[in-house]
Amino acid sequence: MELKKRVQQDLSSAIREKRKEALSVLRLLNSAIINQEKEKRYKKSKENPELGEQELERESQLTEEEILEIISREVKKR
């Protein structure tokens, strides 16, 4: 299962089950993933301005390795 989808599913279940600590951690992680995608999308749009909306969306998707790096980076911060 893709890590991003797993985080989002776990976030939804934490909301339903009212697990406050898990909810806090998963929100933070989801936010970090979204911010990294936005940053990657911005860089891609600057490198290649003629890319279409769908191409930019596809190009800005994070790989599993990139998501693992984000998780590792966030763990080190805390």
Image (spheres, helix red, strand yellow):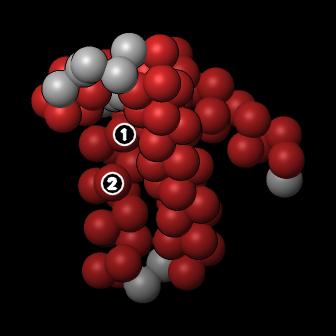
Q: Residue furthest front?
A: 50
Judge from the rendering whether residue 49 lies leftward or rightward of residue 47; answer left or right: left
Q: Residue at x 38, y 15 (%)?
A: 48
Q: Residue at x 17, y 26 (%)?
A: 52
Residue 2, above or below 16: above
Residue 9: image location, x then y, percent: 28, 55
Residue 51, above or below 12: above
Callout count: 2
Residue 22: image location, x then y, percent: 54, 67
- Disc 2 target residue: 8
Residue type, mark 1 in image: Lys
Q: CA distance from mark 2 to mark 1?
A: 6 Å
Residue 43, above or below 14: above
- Can the viewer see residue 7 in this picture? yes
Give the quarter of the figure containing the N terminus. Answer: top left
- Disc 1 target residue: 4
Given contact means CB atoms under 8 Å apart, are the residues at marks 2 and 1 in contact? yes
Q: Element at badge 2?
A: helix
Judge from the rendering whether residue 50 lies leftward or rightward of residue 54; answer left or right: right
Q: Which mark is residue 22?
A: none
Residue 69, above or below 76: above
Q: Residue furthest bottom?
A: 18
Q: Residue at x 76, y 43 (%)?
A: 75
Residue type, mark 2 in image: Gln
- Can the viewer see residue 22 in this picture? no
Q: Please tell me how crowded label 2 is: few (under 14), some (14-19), or many (20+) other residues with Cα within 10 Å.
A: some
Judge from the rendering whether residue 1 lies leftward or rightward of residue 41; answer left or right: left
Judge from the rendering whether residue 64 lies leftward or rightward of residue 59; answer left or right: right
Q: Quadrant of residue 41?
A: top left
Residue 5: image location, x then y, percent: 28, 42
Residue 10: image location, x then y, percent: 36, 57
